[in-house]
Image: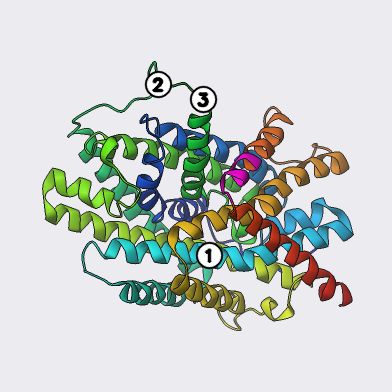
Amino acid sequence: MSLPQANRKLNLLQATSINMIDMVGIGPFVVMPLVVSRFQNGLFLWAWLFGAFTAFIDAMIWSELGAKYPLAGGTYNFHRIAFGEKGGRLMSFLFVWQTAIQAPLVVASGAIGFAQYLSFLVDLNVFQQKLVSGGLVILIFILLYRKIETVGKISVALWSVVVLTVLWIIISGLTHQHHSIPFLPEQTSSFFSLAFWAAIGQGSVNTIYSYLGYYNVCHLGGEIKRPEKNIPQSIFISISGIAILYLLMNVSVMGVVPWQSVREDDKYLVSTFMSQIYGYKAGVVVTVLILWIAMASLFAVVLGYSRVPYAAAVDNNFFKLFSKLHHTKKFPYVSLIFLCGLGLVFSLTFRLVDVISSILAMRILVQFIGQAVGVVLLRKRFGTADLPFKMSLYPIPVILSMIIWLFIFLSTGWFALWGGLIALAGIVVYYLTMQFK
């Protein structure tokens, strides 16, 4: 399968920056109270560790596939190659089908979280928050309507602010600790209790959402320099760096704000934390920086996902309209318009907590578990001799990945049914339309 690829312009620093600003969006700031409030014993750090472990295991699959098949569209091409002619067309179509729905949900989650945090600075009613979230989606669209090399430079600038903001939060908290955070169970609790693992499951739905994006570079595979090295390196660097930052940020904030007092609806936990340390003005400053991070993350998310429907349409496995490139700037503008347009609609209609669960439920079956199966099929068919990157301890990471993703899938509750129904609808659409081309 040959796809027309854009010039490879993005280096390791730019690729890693795109991954990291995708990962550290509004997510860790808005889900922190959701995670802490799930644990009655204060062991919430384990949900963040579980999320990091899940990302590392899954990263081995992404790295092996991304280094071998560095093409625009990421999972679309992995499925297309791994599952053979008939199965590959169906699986890759299903991925694009669910991406066309869940990618705008990701955009909506960032935009809704942005508007939520902005209300710390300005008293906004529900209608006004919706106007803000919709306006942000439009701004992101305008920023991305340009050449990829310009986008790469913008991503590095956005990433630098992300890292500096999180470091400020961490240093502030570590230098003003009031109490410790439990890491091991007390005598009345246990790692093996049903309550602990129920909390891990529910909490990890939110923490894994905050880690998502470590694979964004795979969607831009056709635009990465030296992809056989830069794709795996950018993935593992991103996860390692972000996991450390998330853990330190949780320790910092919860060492100042008593975890027992945190409620699920504490919308501005980090802003309140900075206000307690330095006063209200510091809370305002960190809120502005968090808003910048949310915007930067949306920038990276839309950039990566806009290449997916394009790659499928070029391969004649999605609606042909999406195959169009801008005549002078050479980027998939129809795909960009569609994702931002639907993201705008979702940002005006959904609640944040429902969006997060929907995103994971839709991705797990077709994308994450599908790729785990796909990497096994590819190894059986082609062997491992020409793999630029080989995962360690194969097949253990593949088995662990599927077990963990099924656990998280069930932990989304009734949204698991929603994810399954979206996949079934995709199968119906595929056989009604794509089969007769």
Marked residue nearer the N-terminal end (3 or 2): 2
Query: How many C-alpha atoms fall within 10 Å of the one at disc 3: few (<14), some, or many (≥20)?
Result: few
Residue drawn at x 70%, y 41% as measured from the top left: 388
| Side of 119 where 51 appears, left or right | right
Quarter that holds the N terminus: bottom right
Mark pair 1, 2: CA separation: 36 Å
Total number of numbered labels?
3
Q: Residue furthest bottom?
A: 327
Residue 6 seen in the figure: no
Residue 176 seen in the figure: yes
| Side of 295 where 118 appears, left or right | left
Q: Which residue is mark 3?
A: 193
Residue 305, position in %: x, y? Answer: 58, 64
Residue 236, position in %: x, y? Answer: 54, 40
Q: Quadrant of residue 420?
A: bottom right
Q: Which residues are magenta?
A: 406-413
Q: Are marks 1 and 3 in contact (CB under 8 Å)?
A: no
Residue 16, position in %: x, y? Answer: 49, 50
Q: Amino acid at mark 1?
A: Leu
Residue 183, position in %: x, y? Answer: 38, 24
Q: Which residue is mark 2?
A: 184
Q: Amino acid at mark 3?
A: Ser
Residue drawn at x 63%, y 42% as measured from the top left: 405
Per the picture, the main secondary structure of the magenta-coloured stretch is: helix
Q: Which residue is mark 1?
A: 105
* In front: label 3 or label 2: 3
Closer to the camera in the image, 181 or 340:
181
